[in-house]
Image: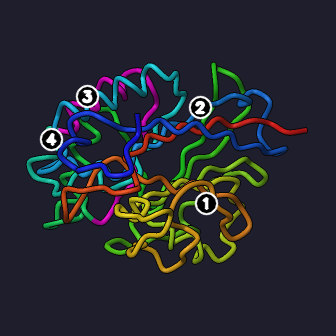
Amino acid sequence: MKSPLVLGPMTARSRHEVTEIAVRSPRLPRAFDGFRVGLLTDLHYGPFVRAGFVRRVVDRLLGLGADLAVLGGDMVDRPSPAAAELAAMLAPLAARVPTFAVLGSHDYAGGGAGRYCCHMRSAGIEVLVNASRLLTRDGGTERIALLGLDDYHQGRPNARAAFAGVPEGLFTLLAGHCPDLLDGLGGAGRVDLALCGHTHGGQIAFFGWAPLTFTRNGRYRRGLVDGPGFPAYISRGLGMTGLPIRWGASPELPVITLRRSD
């Protein structure tokens, strides 16, 4: 049962919500109708979020039948030594589900982005930094593109570099940690759905209003929103930073099902 007041230590040891979302597009290849994407973001593994919670989230996602897992950044509170520990816990997920990651500001902390990427690779997770990968399903020939942008605050997001090599007209998922980067894509290419985190849904909210939004654009605080010409899902994330508390913005594991609309 949900409670409007969720204290961080309680949540980090026990609870999170699974949010099921369907996104429809006539551009989606028929082979990808029903394709399920799990978005794990803002875990902030560290002082307030411990190993047992991480393992439960991984087991939950594996049980939900995801076809793709996207790690949306800030998966650790600080990269060392948490990144190595987290990679070991995420390896069972990557062994069963294609798993990609983008960088968040906390993944850069202490100059640790290189170490973070190295540990993720050791777990079978590819970190996309202004890069793309073409995905197929069940050995078919139809493809979609997954793009990953560098962090908006600590990195150098470059949408044109990410779109390089993506064939024209391909259905495109774009992953980036902070949703503010969506307003700066500058027509680099067509996006069909963006996946972001960073905001924590405000982390503390009162009847839908949050004193802190962590974004310049208030409509990007949480949920399925209108981006600049395409839909975007902004996850509330799974962890906490700064203060070990969530109020009115409970931890979230979104699973987005892509549907073709004719």
The residue sitting at 77% across, 40% down in the picture is: 28
Image coordinates of residue 45 in percent, x first then y, are: 20, 47
Q: Is residue 209 above or below residue 148?
A: below
Question: What is the three-letter code of the residue carrying label 1?
Answer: Phe
Image coordinates of residue 180 in percent, x first then y, are: 50, 73
Q: Is residue 100 magenta?
A: yes
**Mark 3 or mark 2, whichever is nearer to me:** 3
The residue sitting at 75% across, 35% down in the picture is: 259
Question: What is the three-letter code of the residue carrying label 3?
Answer: Arg
Reading the image, the residue beneath label 1 is 163
Give the left or right position of residue 215, taking residue 172 as reference.
left
Whichever of callouts 4 and 3 sits on the residue coming sooner in the sequence is: 3
Reading the image, the residue beneath label 4 is 84
Q: CA distance from mark 2 to mark 4?
A: 27 Å
Question: What is the three-letter code of the residue carrying label 2?
Answer: Arg
Q: What crowding class fits label 2: few (fewer than 14 Cα within 10 Å), some (14-19), or many (20 or more)?
A: many
Q: CA distance from mark 3 to mark 2?
A: 20 Å
